[in-house]
Every structure is written in structure tokens, then in C-alpha cells.
Amino acid sequence: MVKKIVIAIACITAISLNAQDGTVSPYSYFGIGEIKASSSVENQMMGGVATYTDSIHVNLSNPAGYSKLRLTAYSAGISYKQLALNSAVEKENSAITNLDYLAIGLPLGKGFGLGFGLNTYSSVGYNFRSETQTTNSDGSLTNVINLYSGTGGLNKVYVSLGYELLKNLSIGVTANYNFGTLDNERAQNIEEVQFGTTDRRSSRIFGMDFNYALNYEPKISDKHTLYSSVRVNTQANLSGRNRQQIGSFSTSDGTNIEIFEIDLAAQGLEKTGLKVPTTTTFGLGYGENKKWFLGGEYSFQKLSTFTNEFVDIDNFTYQDASTLAFGGYFIPDYTSFTSYLKRVTYRAGVRFEQTGMVVNDTEINNFGITFGVGLPLASGNGGFSNINLGFEYGKRGTTEANLIEENYFKVNIGLSLNDRWFVKRKIN
């Protein structure tokens, strides 16, 4: 039954990752789109803290954790996000549902584990309008309307290895292959002019990056453990195969009048490179295994070095990005046979992110509060599979400088199933 469920999830996820519009955020207009959470639901509900690893869950952000796996772990995540988009003069509501990831972790022997899967890297999905005025030769003003829209995003397939070098010291590496298409269009029309102009740009993106992890988890006492990790997600060297079309359209009904293909090879823009800078994360935590954990992480990225030669955006720059997160979990009694609620895992966290985006000379920051529960699927302590429900409330952006403030509420559902592979059957 477990394998049938996983096969069904795999098929649905593979279709959805290629078909879904993963965001409706206007901020996905910038860079390679809105960067999606790279962690499982369990870690997302602890503010994104991924320093803690265990023997039954896949940790998508910390490959060193695969060294601790004792059971085969299947994991899948889905999310539903409601957004209230506020400007200085109006408000709009929207919502979107995504299948976020599919992952499998395999214990290959004592202190050695393998993982592989598929998840989203970034999403593009915006549609907004800006209006300016130009001064004519006679001193009168004319309205100029720009309509911006975009779709697409990047997915990644990955393979991870984790190995315990010494007691309490483990290392891990993940190789990611990123791929997808980014489509952007700008349509402009001038008041009382019959025809407008359009500029359509499409980039097919692909490339590799690697995530290295080092975990050190010494025992402080018989019950308590110090958890520490260093993770380095190396620079993603992405290649773009680009296409651009410009043309005109009728402002009355939107019909295309003329469309021309731009010779990008002559401009040296048919093939371009995108280098997404390295992200480094330090994590530290303390707790009692299978009972409670509290930890924090700090990540930083030299995003100011990122450029996209093919897409030039006015009034926008990158600065260095950083994230500070705190979170943890609590299990009253995971061995309890009499109380289901005592076997539930309770998680919570908080996250503050400086995204690195500067629009109209204004920094775009993101703040989120997370909480959730892990619900066991089997009675007693003989089963380890669970459903993880998570909730996040947060705010990104601001209404200052003619920008958009996003207030969002996100619901996550994560399925974590366990099975035994490579175990020799015994006949009594």
C-alpha cells in the first residue's frame, strides 16, 4: 500500500511541477522568480531551521542528515497560500496551491544514507500595471500604461549522500540539476494611440549547484545533545537559451498586428549565464532526542553580485541577503499507548529575511511566524509514519515608494512514510 501511494504521489507531482503557476507575487518579476522553501514541511514549521536531523525523516536542506536514517523514508509536500496584496490605494486577494516536493531517503548501512527527489526551486507568476505621464510638445500630459506579466519557474532534481565520519560527526553533499523556463512580457500603450507595443522574452534555464553539510552533535549529558551544522549551497551556474519577440497590437481588442523575432545572436544575448551566489548557513541547537529541540540559524548570501544580462529592470538593484530563523519542537511522550495527543509532535518557529531586493530605493524584507503538528499514522510506538500539518503567517514588502505589501497565510501538508528496504527476511 505504501508503495502504491508513493507511485501515485510521484505521478501527480511530476505533472504538477511542470504545469503549476507556483506564485502570484509581483516580486517574482525579479531575478529568477520567487525562491521557494528548500526544506520539508517539518523544518518549515520550525522557522526553516534544518540543523536537527533524525532517523525517520528526510531533511531536504541538510544532506548530512541522511547518515542517520534507519528506515526508508518517503516524503511529499503540498501547500496552499492565501495572499492579500496591498498598495497605497487598493487591495487584492489571491490564492494558489502547489505540490512542492517529492523525496525518498534510503539507509545503505550504518552511518551511510542516500536521498533523491524532485522539488521546486523558483516560481514566476505576476501580472501588474503601472501608469506614468509624459509631457507633449504643447505642454499637455499623456498617460502611458505598461502591463507586465510573467509565468514559469525552475525545478530541480537532486541526489544526496550522507556519511558518518566519526562518532557524532557527519558530512553530506547534494547535487542539484536545475531546469525550467522563464517567460516575461511587457505591453505598452499610450492614451489615444490606436496601437500598442509588446516585448516578449523567454529563457530556457538549466544548470548545476551543490549543497555541502557538516553536522556535529556531541552529547552534553545522558539526555541532552548539542546540535550544530554548517551548510554551504554553492554558486548555481545556470545557462540561459533566450528568445525575444517585439511587435504591435490593437489597443481596442488586443489583436497582434506585427510580431518580429529579434536576432539575439548578433547582440551576444542568445546564450547568457546566470550565477546565483553561494549561500552559507550556520546552525546551533540544543535538546533531548525524541523529546524537544530548540535551535537557530543564520544564512547569508552575497546577492549583490547577481546579474541578468538578458532582462534589464529599471529602479531595481540587489544587495546582500540574509536570514535569521529560530524554531523547535516538543513531543510529550512518543512511546505513549494511552494518549494520542502525547505522541503528537508540536512545532513552532519564526523567521526574518532580508531578501536582497531593493526596489525604488526601498529594501524588501520578509517576516514569518510558523507552527504545526506531526500526527502519527500508527498506534503505539511501533509505527513511525506521520502527516505533518503546518501553518505560516507573514508579511513581505511595503506600501511605501509605490510598492506592494504582501500579507500571506500558508497551509502546508507533508506526508512522511517509512518502510524497510534491504532487510533480510526471517522465517520463524
Image: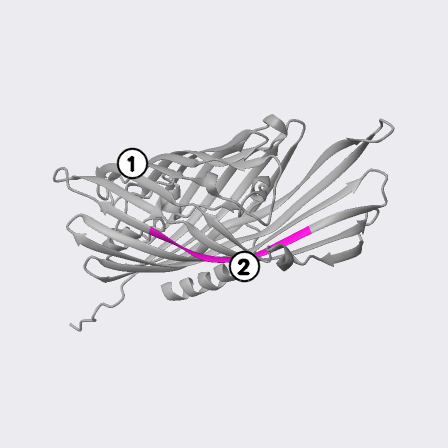
Span shown in magenta: 200-211
Whether residue 382 is visible, yes or no, is no
Residue 146 position by quadrant: top right
Reading the image, the residue beneath label 2 is: 18
Whether residue 83 is visible, yes or no, is yes
Element class at badge 2: helix
Residue 52: x %, y % from top left: 28, 44
In the picture provided, is 302 more to the left or to the right than 426? right
Residue 107: x %, y % from top left: 25, 61
Q: Amino acid at mark 2?
A: Asn
Q: Amino acid at mark 1?
A: Gly
Reading the image, the residue beneath label 1 is: 295
Foreground pick, 276 / 414:
276
Q: Is residue 203 magenta?
A: yes
- Quadrant location, the N terminus: bottom left
Element class at badge 1: strand
| Residue drawn at (75%, 38%) of the image | 145
Vertical relation: 64 (above or below) 331: below
Farthest-out residue, left: 222
Residue 290 position by quadrant: top left
Residue 62: x %, y % from top left: 32, 49
Mark 1 closeness class: few <14, some 14–19, many ≥20 residues within 10 Å: many
